Amino acid sequence: LLNLSISILLAQFLFLVGSGQTGSKAGCVFIAIVLHFAFLASFSWMSIIAFDTWRAFSFSGQSAMRSDKAKQRQRIMKRLAIGYLSVFVLVIILTALDQSGAFAIRYGGSKGCWINNGDANLYIFVIPVSLALVWNAVFFVLTVKAIRVAKQQSRAAVNEGDQKRDIVVYAKIASLMGFAWVFGILAAFISEYLMFPFVIFTTAQGVFIAVSFVFTRR
């Protein structure tokens, strides 16, 4: 959760204060590259959390996650490699291809400090983000199912209060999955008015996470 928060903070901060800094070409290119890394890292961590959340609520996952400290450290290192290192290597390769002219990504430019080639933006950002959202949606559904199965197996009586608490839990989990980006993707194909909920929910994601997981007793 900390790594996701760091990635989101970096991405949103750079987007707000740096995406329009086109005065320096080299600086704009650097901002675009780091911004690309930060957004991809955010989705990488969202996908890791989606998988780990499902494991935490499933019986098979609970037994697999009970291990000694050495295995726990190994698991943390694997997640750091997936969450940061793999994205870093990918962005470095893409930067090298862009600078060599082998693949025109056009990091930075007069239009803004982002990916200025529409086709490149589709292939190296929109498609990876879409795949991550599909992954997150699948494991969100599996997590909800695992929670419901666990309640049924515990044979606990389900009342209205329990149902409301379950809905709150589902909403908290959903706040980590980046589902607001669906509005942003659909806005490019359906209606630009979908950008309004996209901007509202994506900028408020940090607040949702803080309220759901930081400023809470449980």
Image: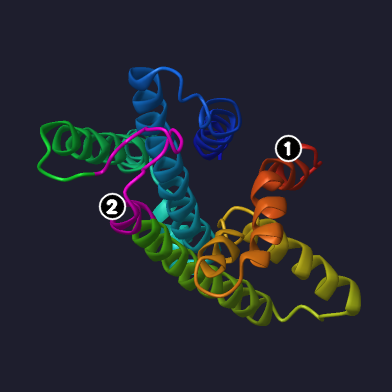
Q: Which residue is mark 1?
A: 214
Q: Secondary structure at mark 1?
A: helix
Q: Which residue is mark 2?
A: 120
Residue at (56, 57) in percent of width and height: 177
Give the spatial CA distance, label 2 vs label 1.
Answer: 37 Å
Looking at the picture, how far across and down is residue 198, in whole percent?
64, 57
Q: Main secondary structure of the magenta part?
A: loop
Residue at (39, 29) in percent of width and height: 34
Q: Residues within 10 Å of mark 2 (few under 14, many from 20)?
A: some
Of the two numbered discs 2 and 1 in the rendering, the one whose residue sits closer to the viewer: 2
Q: Is residue 79 magenta?
A: no
Q: Quadrant of residue 210?
A: top right
In the image, is residue 160 above or below residue 173? Answer: below
Amino acid type at circle 2 is: Ala
Looking at the picture, how far across and down is residue 111, in whole percent?
44, 38
Q: Quadrant of residue 91?
A: top left
Amino acid type at circle 1 is: Val
Q: Which residues are magenta?
A: 105-125
Tag of residue 89: none
Q: Nearer the viewer, residue 42 or 27?
A: 27
